[in-house]
Image (cartoon, rainbow, N blue to C red):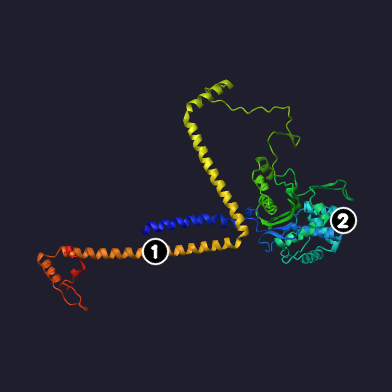
Amino acid sequence: MKIEKWKYRGVVFLVLCLSLLPSLAALGESEGGEAVPELSARAAAVMDLDTGDLIYGKAENEMLYPGGLTKIMTVLLMVEDCDLSETVSFSEIMYDLEEESLRLALQPGEEITLYDAACAIMLSSANDVANGVAEYIAGSPEAFAGKMNDRAAELGCKNTHFANPHGLYSEDTYTSAYDFALIARAAYENATFREICKLTEYTIPATNLTDSPRQLQNYHQMLQVDSGYYQEWCLGGKSSYTSQGLNSIVTFGSSGGKNLVSVLMAVPEADAAYNETIDLLYYGFGDTSGAQEKDAETETQTQGRMGLEPISTSQETGGTVQPVPEDVTLPAEEAPLPAGETENTTENVQQQTEGAAENAGEGVGEIRESENSIDAVLDQVEEFWTRGRVIAAEYAKTHFAQVLALGCMFMLFLFLLIVVLLRRAVRGSRSQRERKRTDRILREKESLIEHMSVEELEEELRRREKPEPGINGGRREKQDSEGIDPTSYPRGDL
């Protein structure tokens, strides 16, 4: 009876657990029921450009090395404080950089406009240009860094400090994802900055020292149409990689009436930086369809992400990839025939196929029907689970406190159940040890009785029949000379 009772309690407990799972899972979903993306980035932030509200944050106040993202602040000061039509002449300060850092390769005394310089800094991450502009505006890169820190403080940044205008590694350069979202939002409010950051390419014309124009291409792949990361709603941004700070990326986007900026810092892989940026901004937009389309990318797009050109229906001519003309028919690849076999005609192949289908019989049909029925059941289960999650998400959105309390009650119930089960296990173990001890004593006494003679047994019976006053007037049997208490056994045992 007790076993059936505990079985019933176990079933109730299992049903309770299953009913709580969708509600508890809903705590990690967005207002629209969309799951929060999982990120490999060490820190991230998504901010509404119109309101300044933080939509998403992961370690958003942790101080990290920004790398080339620093240049957004550099360009912000340029568009706010300078006339970009002015011409700047660069000095040898441009060479005060790490040897392998990105450069535009200007020469001392070469002149370009500040607008050209801003494009070179934002699109091609030209560190030499950033140094030259800093000297032009503030007299030295160090003085310009002071202006950058002052502007960051004005924007409300509490975990930010800049030591140079380009972002090459320095222990005194750090920021947080939230602070940089504030900086990026301030920059995007400037129309000139918006114009520059969304350029996919730009040409710096010939200068006083060079006869050839310089072609710039935006390193942010979500702007490039031929990239596997391209998104129509992307409005620009800045990407960065350094060995100390790994991959970091700032991206502006607009969709469904929402204007957002995302900041990801310290992402281990470049591919993850772009994919997680796309996921985060879709999350901010509240749009799941775009994320589903991204997950269904074709093999050609994957090749594009790896920096490879698509190889289907194309031919290489003169170092460039050209599409195959429509009037050209590509020959089908012919596989060698096995030894001893002749090529089958279309008619022969059709006859063989029909014969194989007839020989298969009804077994194939039965297997297919079984597979279809299983698929139908799985589809129904998936639909039921999806509806449950949506309903639970809606309920959790309006009853967060109740769901949280229910989760706490569930954990408490689970704890109490574990305690009860442990107590029962200990009690059962004790009972089992007591039974074993009693059985052992009983076997020893039975063995002793078996060796008693008939006269000794009769004497024992007579002792049992002769009463002796007890402490409370009751009856107590005498113990025999060998220490055996026959009263502890039924008469039949003797």
Dot 1 or dot 2: first in sequence order is 2
Q: Nearer the viewer, residue 138 or 223?
A: 223
Q: Vertical placement of 234 versus 344: above or below?
A: below
Residue 187 on image: x %, y %: 79, 58
Which residue carries the number 2 mark? 84
Residue 182 on image: x %, y %: 75, 61
Quadrant in the picture for residue 51: bottom right
Residue 344 on image: x %, y %: 56, 22
Classify the position of the C terminus by image quarter. bottom left
Q: Residue at x 81, y 59 (%)?
A: 76
Residue 302 on image: x %, y %: 66, 43
Question: Looking at the picture, which amino acid does disc 2 mark?
Answer: Leu
Q: Secondary structure at mark 2?
A: loop
Q: Is residue 34 left or right of residue 338?
A: right
Q: Residue at x 38, y 56 (%)?
A: 4
Which residue carries the number 1 mark? 424
